[in-house]
Amino acid sequence: MLSDREFTLLRLLAQQTKPLTSRALAAQLDVSVRTVKTYVQRINREAPGVVISGQQGYRCDPETVRALLEQGRTPGDTPQTNEERTVYVLHRLLASDSVDIFDLCEQLFVSYSTIKGVVSAIRGKLSPFHLGLKLENNHLQITGRERDKRRLVSDLLYNEATVNFLDLKTVQQAFPQIDIAYIEACVRSVLGASHCFANDYSMINLVLHVAITIDRIQGGRTVSAALPKVSARGSASEGDGDATTSGTEAAPDQTSGVIAAAGADSAIGPQELEMARTIARELERHFNVELNATEVSELALLLASRTTMLDYRTASRENIERFVGAGCLEIVNEMIADLKENAGIDLSEHEFYVRFALHVKNLIVRARTGGLSKNPLTLQIKTSCPLLYDTAVVEADLLQRRAGIHVNDDEIAYIAFHLGSTLETQKQLTNKVKAVLYCPSYYNIDAKILLFLNRHFEEDLLVTNVVTDEGDLGHLAGAELLITTVPVNAYYGVPTYLVSIVPTEADRAHIRRMVDDIRAEKRRCVLRSHLEGLIEPALFEVNTRPLDRDEVIHLMAERLHARGYVTEDFERQVREREELSSTVYGTIALPHALRLASLHSSISVMLSRAPISWGDAKVNLVVMLSFSKSDQEVFYEVFDPLVSVLANREQASALMDATDYESFIARLCEMME
């Protein structure tokens, strides 16, 4: 049977309209070219002829691949890689009290030494969830609190759904014995009756939480706490820390439990608690389970951090403080002021202000109660909108310091999502192509052409002049496009289009293509100019020594400091930014400071033949950015397209083949154009 990687290879081929080279596939899969060829051989053994090899690369028949993907892996399939084995064993351990290590060897058809490697990987997976792994009498067992095991179950599901975002269909497949549609209908009904709102991602998170809770309770595993809680029936009860159920966790320390946290109790209002009780009663009746007091409280806490009590369109600056609190609103105002001062971004528009304030309020609640959200768009936002993401990192740092919380990568991506919706609208207003209309005065044709241009290109074209005499065309400056109703006798240095006196759909389409081409060419020229000025030969290095992240940051920062481009504090600032959220994109790292505070703008490059250890990743190319505040616009022009190139595995791989400064610059400019 095919492995997950082989299914991924098939999916990549099916999504393309042209063949993919083995090198392109290797970059996408993060494996060697030789491994790609091995995958292809195994695929064709399982399904002869499905992958076709040609001079331009590999291709496949989409319909055949679709059938294979729909068939997919079955529960009886044997995991093929260590990563697949790790996930398999984790699921086994979560489903039972302990697992015999020699039974695993037989089930997975692997040696004891291979299983030892899997065990080591599992310990690494468990550590972030404050869970341990005990090996006693050849039996493996996960140790730790039940609520942390539930967090691990949720994380495994999200990670397994990275190709197709986690949705309710995926949740149903993960819990076939549980009626997911009923849970969703129940939650939506209770929220609606309480005039409460949750977006689609929050709804999936709520339903998943409930599904995991029911599944674990049905397996005899409940969460308990030492503090008094309110039960689904509405009466106060003591924590069941001394419960005798074998799957029930021991009572945690009062300062460590989610509900025991001071911020948790204050976050749950009477409405959230009543909604949780109502949902719990319905679940108990339908699934024949009993949610204890703590589980009801944790559901209430989830409702408090992932829903809002109003539709943002009914809110205003005058009443928003009642919903988010004065302290939260003060932080929101500080974040918006910081964006304006340090990034030149004005986000004071009413709709953004209200939505963002509500989001920050819920984020603070989630952070203080240990319930930070998973964001299925994090990687996409980080790679396709890197500058937007980096701006969000800066604001997340401000929020962390002011609110005394930790904001993870997923929550940073949510902040970026909010910023992006408003920035996109603003960008459209500053990117118009300047055009001149040459139209001899005849029956008011010029007015009719202008009306046509305004109707179809209001957001794209700025007509700076209407000329009736061709002799005046030689004296115009700043024009980027000439639109004329009659043939001209000379070339005036800009693209020229002859439009019909009664413009047609073909005219509209042709002008659209010309406008897009002009914009692209302007961007190419600007980027090439910036790159050649920023990446100096003295700041380019080909490294052959084994190094780690800290050594590389020190070496590159020292070089910039020696040239007088940055202050002595620059290295510390770069490290601080790295600690907030890794700047790794595939096999590339882009370290930089949180703020644009360099003395002289530059880009340093280290091309390493030996992989550099960068946290949990291995990188071969490091591009250190250092910009002064006076070059803020240059930074914005360069950052996104640079990261887009570097985050593309095939292009990054081609860059790494460069042998010197000249070949590197030539390839980079070509790719960014």
Image (cartoon, helix red, strand yellow):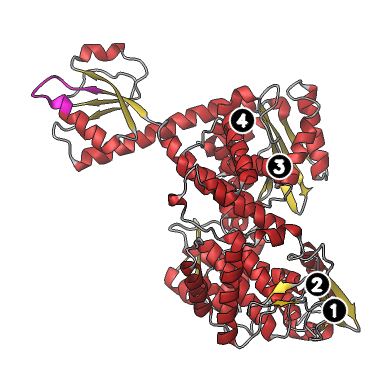
| Numbered disc 2: secondary structure | loop
Instruction: Kindly identify the amino acid type of the residue bearing the numbered disc 3.
Output: Arg
Q: Which residues are magenta?
A: 437-447
Q: Is residue 177 above or below residue 530?
A: below
Residue 655 appears in the figure: no
The answer for how far apart the CA atoms under marks 4 and 2 are is 47 Å
Q: Which residue is mark 1?
A: 112
- Residue at 82% of width from left, 74% of height from top? 251
- Going from the N terminus, do you reach mark 2 or mark 1 first? 1
Instruction: Name the mark nearer the viewer: 1 or 4.
Output: 4
Q: Which residue is mark 4?
A: 342
Instruction: Name the mark nearer the viewer: 1 or 3.
Output: 3
- Residue at 73% of width from left, 42% of height from top? 401
Q: Nearer the viewer, residue 215 or 385?
A: 215
The answer for how far apart the CA atoms under marks 3 and 4 are is 18 Å
Instruction: Kindly identify the amino acid type of the residue bearing the numbered disc 1.
Output: Tyr
The answer for how far apart the CA atoms under marks 2 and 1 are is 41 Å
Q: Quadrant of residue 511?
A: top left
Q: Nearer the viewer, residue 537 or 473?
A: 473
Instruction: Kindly identify the amino acid type of the residue bearing the numbered disc 2.
Output: Ala
**Residue pushed farthest left?**
443
447 horizontally vs 262: left or right: left
| Numbered disc 3: secondary structure | helix
- Judge the density around disc 1: few (<14), some (14-19), many (≥20) Cα neighbours within 10 Å: some
Q: Which residue is mark 3?
A: 402
Marks 3 & 4, CB-CB < 8 Å contact: no
- Judge the density around disc 2: few (<14), some (14-19), many (≥20) Cα neighbours within 10 Å: some
**Residue pushed farthest bottom?**
288
Q: Quadrant of residue 30?
A: bottom right
